[in-house]
C-alpha cells in the first residue's frame, strides 16, 4: 500500500510494528547481544550449552519486536559473539562444523519462536480491541433504541408478570 506524503510523493506504508528504523533496531539489538555475551561469559566454560542458551534467549526476546530485517542482523551478531568469545577466545572466529550449523539452527528457531509469540500477542490485542468496540457499539445501539422505548425492558416484564 502506498501513502501520499505532504510533498505529494508516494511512499510505502509502514505498519505500527516497524515504527523504529531498522538501523536503530539493529544497534539496540547489538547492545542486547553484547550484554547477553557478558552474562553468558559468567557461566562456566564447562557448560557451553548454557552459555549459548543465554544468546539464544536474547535473540528470541529481541524477535518480539517483529522487525525481521533487524532480527536477521541481530541473530548474526549473536552467532558471531557466541563463536568468537564464548566458544573460542579473544574474538577468534572459526568454523566448528556441524556444531555451528546446530547453533545457527537454534538461533533461527529462537528468532522464529519469538517472532511468532509477538505476532500472536498483537493478534490477541486486535481481537480484544474489536470485541470492546463491538460491545460499545451494541450497548450504545441498545441504549438508543431503548430510549425510544422500542426494546422491551426486563424490569417491565417483572412488573407485569408479578
Image: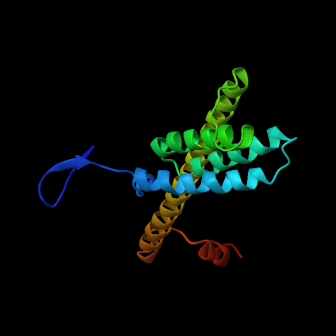
Count the marks.
0
Q: Nearer the viewer, residue 128 or 49?
A: 49
Above or below for 6 versus 109:
below
Would you say 94 lies left or right of 21 here? right
- The residue lying at 42 percent from left, 72 percent from top is 144
Q: Most extreme residue toward the top, as rendered?
A: 98
The N terminus lies in quadrant? top left
The answer to which quarter of the image holds residue 35 is: bottom right
- The residue lying at 73 percent from left, 25 percent from top is 99
Task: Kindly tell me whether residue 127 is visible in this rendering.
Answer: no
Q: Nearer the viewer, residue 17 or 143?
A: 17
Q: Position of residue 44 (x, y in %)?
A: 86, 48
Q: Nearer the viewer, residue 139 or 68?
A: 68
- The residue lying at 67 percent from left, 44 percent from top is 90
Q: Most extreme residue toward the left, as rendered?
A: 8
Q: Position of residue 125 (x, y in %)?
A: 55, 56
- State the scheme by which the image is colored: rainbow
Task: Kindly tell me whether residue 160 is visible in this rendering.
Answer: yes
Above or below for 40 versus 162:
above
Q: Position of residue 140 (x, y in %)?
A: 45, 70
- The residue lying at 48 percent from left, 62 percent from top is 133
The C terminus lies in quadrant? bottom right
Q: Position of residue 113 (x, y in %)?
A: 64, 40
Above or below for 35 versus 158:
above
Above or below for 72 versus 13:
above
Would you say 42 lies left or right of 19 here? right
Amino acid at each position: 500500500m502506498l501513502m501520499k506524503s505532504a510533498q505529494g510523493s508516494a511512499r510505502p506504508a509502514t505498519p505500527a510494528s516497524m515504527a523504529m528504523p531498522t538501523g536503530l533496531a539493529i544497534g539496540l539489538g547489538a547492545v542486547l547481544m553484547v550484554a547477553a555475551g557478558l552474562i553468558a561469559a559468567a557461566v562456566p566454560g564447562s557448560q557451553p550449552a548454557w552459555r549459548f542458551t543465554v544468546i539464544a534467549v536474547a535473540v528470541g526476546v529481541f524477535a518480539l519486536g517483529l522487525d525481521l530485517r533487524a532480527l536477521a542482523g541481530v541473530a548474526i551478531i549473536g552467532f558471531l559473539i557466541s563463536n568468537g568469545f564464548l566458544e573460542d577466545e579473544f574474538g577468534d572466529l572459526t568454523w566448528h562444523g556441524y556444531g555451528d550449523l546446530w547453533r545457527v539452527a537454534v538461533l533461527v528457531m529462537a528468532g522464529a519462536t519469538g517472532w511468532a509469540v509477538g505476532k500472536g500477542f498483537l493478534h490477541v490485542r486486535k481481537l480484544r480491541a474489536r470485541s470492546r468496540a463491538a460491545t460499545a457499539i451494541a450497548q450504545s445501539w441498545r441504549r438508543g433504541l431503548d430510549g425510544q422505548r422500542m426494546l422491551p425492558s426486563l424490569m417491565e416484564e417483572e412488573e407485569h408478570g408479578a
